[in-house]
Image (cartoon, grey):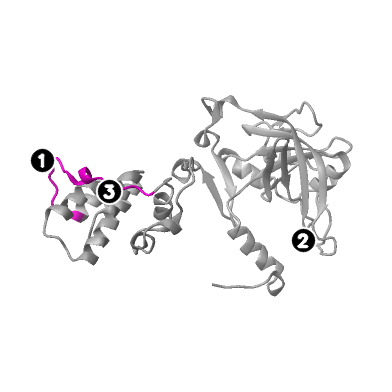
């Protein structure tokens, strides 16, 4: 593994590495206006939410790395203390990318990118009508992160004063990730689409799990089970006890090939092939039982996985 301090690498290379490792990042399509009312629009991926009570978001309008001058977003926000932040969806990512071009300050990026202005109610800058999720914000504080460095970053901390959320992205009373179809920023020219197979559900623990350190050695040191597998097993409130009826197979059970049963998503059938035939040597038996348990874990069957792992060798 490479190890280095920020001072040991060129800032441009560090920028590439940092943005590739701290990813994916949400994109804030920030709308501002100067004191004359001229609108500006620019995307920022140094962005996130940090509080919901009160609702606070922050993004990083850095100075230009080329000459250290202030970007229009920074200047407008400092002059007026107001902005809007529109979420970037997959259907508008190319337009958002276009708005990042360095146009003169009197050029309207809304028009250049083909976006429609959504009038704001509590601040002057408009948001993007094409976005299903937008926030009207007021600046709380602008922090210059390194005044002595040319092209240094800033942190704009803003309070959300109004939200605009499309009803079409809801499923019941919550926003559906597949319907909002957001995109996130990766390193270099890479993006990620946060919908479809790319998103998954993972419930927060409801109990204090026993922890991976409390797993029996043959499970914790398994050459088959992954860290994710171990975490699922360690999420139980207490270590289960072996249930003798677990291996009482139905008389109609038919399964002959261990690997085929696992590949077909039938770990119980795979277990049957292991226990109904000639017992393999203990090490081979343990390996097979761990593979069966992994099959159960992939299906969310934590109890079945534990019962498999508790079987005597």
Residue name at image x 31 percent, y 48 percent: 241
Alpha carbon separation for disc pair 3 and 2:
63 Å
Which one is nearer the viewer's eye here, 158 or 248?
248
The residue that label 1 is drawn on is 251
Looking at the image, which residue is at 85% across and 35% down?
37
State the image coordinates of residue 30 (x, y, percent, origin top left): 73, 41
Q: Is residue 32 left or right of residue 179?
A: right
Marks 1, 2: nearer the viewer = 1
Q: Which residues are magenta?
A: 239-258
Is residue 278 rendered to the left or right of residue 293? Answer: left
Residue 121 in the image, given as x and y percentages of width and height: 77, 26
The image position of residue 112, as x and y in percent, is: 71, 41
The answer to whether residue 106 is seen in the rendering is no
Looking at the rendered structure, the secondary structure element under dot 3 is: loop
Q: Looking at the image, which residue is at 16% across and 63% down?
A: 280
> What main secondary structure does the magenta stretch of the protein show?
loop
- Identify the secondary structure beneath mark 2: loop
Q: Earlier in the sequence, mark 1 or mark 2?
A: 2
Q: Residue at x 81, y 41 (%)?
A: 139
Q: Nearer the viewer, residue 150 or 274?
A: 274
Q: Earlier in the sequence, mark 3 or mark 2?
A: 2
Mark identifier at residue 242: 3
Q: Quadrant of the N terminus?
A: bottom right
Q: Which residue is mark 2?
A: 65
Whichever of callouts 3 and 1 sits on the residue coming sooner in the sequence is 3
């Amino acid at each position: 593994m490479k190890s280095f301090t920020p001072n040991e690498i060129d800032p441009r290379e560090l920028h590439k590495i940092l943005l590739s490792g701290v990813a994916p990042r949400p994109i804030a399509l920030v709308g501002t206006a100067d004191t004359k009312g001229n609108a500006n629009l620019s995307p920022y991926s140094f962005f996130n939410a940090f509080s919901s009570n009160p609702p606070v978001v922050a993004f990083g309008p850095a100075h230009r790395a080329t000459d250290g001058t202030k970007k229009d977003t920074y200047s407008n926000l400092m002059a007026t203390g107001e902005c809007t932040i529109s979420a970037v969806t997959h259907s508008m990512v190319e337009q958002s990318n276009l708005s990042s071009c360095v146009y003169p300050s009197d050029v309207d990026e809304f028009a250049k990118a083909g976006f429609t202005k959504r009038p704001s109610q509590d601040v002057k800058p408009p948001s993007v009508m094409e976005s299903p999720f937008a926030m009207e914000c007021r600046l709380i504080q602008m922090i210059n992160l390194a005044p002595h460095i040319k092209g240094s970053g800033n942190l704009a901390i803003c309070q959300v004063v109004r939200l605009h959320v499309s009803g079409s992205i809801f499923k019941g009373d919550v926003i559906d990730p597949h319907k909002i179809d957001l995109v996130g920023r990766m390193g270099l020219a890479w993006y990620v689409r946060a919908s479809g197979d790319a998103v998954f559900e993972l419930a927060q623990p409801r109990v204090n799990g026993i922890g991976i350190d409390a797993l029996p050695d043959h499970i914790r040191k398994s050459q088959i089970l992954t860290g994710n597998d171990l975490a699922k097993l360690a999420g139980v409130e207490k270590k289960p006890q072996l249930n003798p009826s677990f291996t009482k197979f139905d008389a109609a059970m038919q399964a002959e090939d261990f690997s085929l049963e696992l590949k077909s998503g039938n770990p119980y059938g795979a277990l049957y092939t292991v226990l109904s035939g000639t017992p393999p040597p203990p090490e081979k038996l343990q390996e097979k039982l761990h593979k069966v348990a992994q099959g159960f874990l992939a299906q969310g069957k934590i109890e079945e996985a534990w019962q498999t792992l508790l079987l005597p060798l």
